[in-house]
Amino acid sequence: MTVREVEPGLFVRGFEPPLPLSRFKLVAFDMDSTLINIECVDEIAAAAGRKAEVAAITEAAMRGEIADYRDSLRQRLQLLRGVPLSALEAVYAQHLRLNPGVETFVRACQAAGLKTLLVSGGFTFFSERIRHRLGLDFARANELDLEAGPQGPCLSGRLVPRPWGEIVDGAEKRRVLLEVAELMGIPPDKTIAVGDGANDLPMMAVAGLSIAYHPKPAVQDQAMLSITQGGMDRALTLLQA
């Protein structure tokens, strides 16, 4: 399928802009490196002195070089065992920022009547704060298990089992998007999926519009709209209110 660069760093594939934003009813966002500027697991790892080791696994997983995302996450979590909860508070306060243009794009979607969904392979510690900060309707992410440590609560290296399972991977992201769409009574082509990494591809593949924000190469190769320069609000150049 032909890709066209309509402006520097703004690529389209498979549709002719502009599209009316109100044509869609639900938008699903990845969190780490999409809504926010960091990969939270890597910043937590910095507190354990293991950032380089963990970041290498994260990068390989996001590029699609590790086929089993669940296994890659379990590997990283084991390296984080013993990190105090206070370190997560410090990551949120000192390192985590919304990416440029995120608030503008989210507000435009909300103004056009879309429901908003955050679906992340990251952690509820951060996703719930972002959900409230942006006023998003729904969220799903992994919940970190805690145990007692010398500095108070700390990471056990495991996740808390949930009614739907344990780990949000690419398959779960796709399932959640389709489930929320079904509960809303809308077909998948009325949804938008926004992400950057390989584990976002399954939900992007079933959405009516896929948006890649500063994506890994494998994601840019498949997305309908790719933003490689500037903020997320650049998508509004191609989407009418």
Image: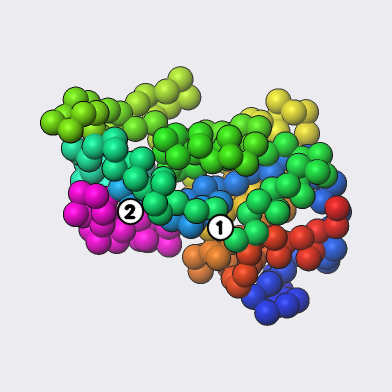
Above-or-below relation of 184 to 13: above
Q: The residue under label 2 is which amino acid type?
A: Asp
Relative side of 58 to 2, left or right: left
In front of the other: 130 or 53:
130
Span colored in magenta:
45-66
In terms of image quadrants, where is residue 177?
top right
Q: SS at mark 1?
A: loop
In what quadrant of the picture does the N terminus appear?
bottom right
Coordinates of residue 83 in the picture (x, y in percent):
22, 40
First in sequence, mark 1 or 2: give its number.
Answer: 2
Residue at (41% x, 46% y) in the render: 93
Q: Does residue 64 show up magenta in the picture? A: yes
Q: Residues within 10 Å of mark 2 (few under 14, many from 20)?
A: many
Q: Is residue 198 visible?
A: no
Q: The residue under label 1 is which amino acid type?
A: Asn
For residue 99, the mark is 1
Instruction: Name the residue carrying label 2.
Output: 42
Rounded to the nearest whole Å, what is the CA distance between mark 1 and mark 2? 17 Å
Relative side of 41 to 114, left or right: left
Residue at (43% x, 62% y) in the render: 63
Coordinates of residue 72 in the picture (x, y in percent):
31, 48
In front of the other: 222 or 158:
158
Which colour assignment does the render follow?
A: rainbow
Q: Residues within 10 Å of mark 1 (few under 14, many from 20)?
A: some
In terms of image quadrants, where is residue 175?
top right
Residue at (82% x, 51% y) in the render: 21
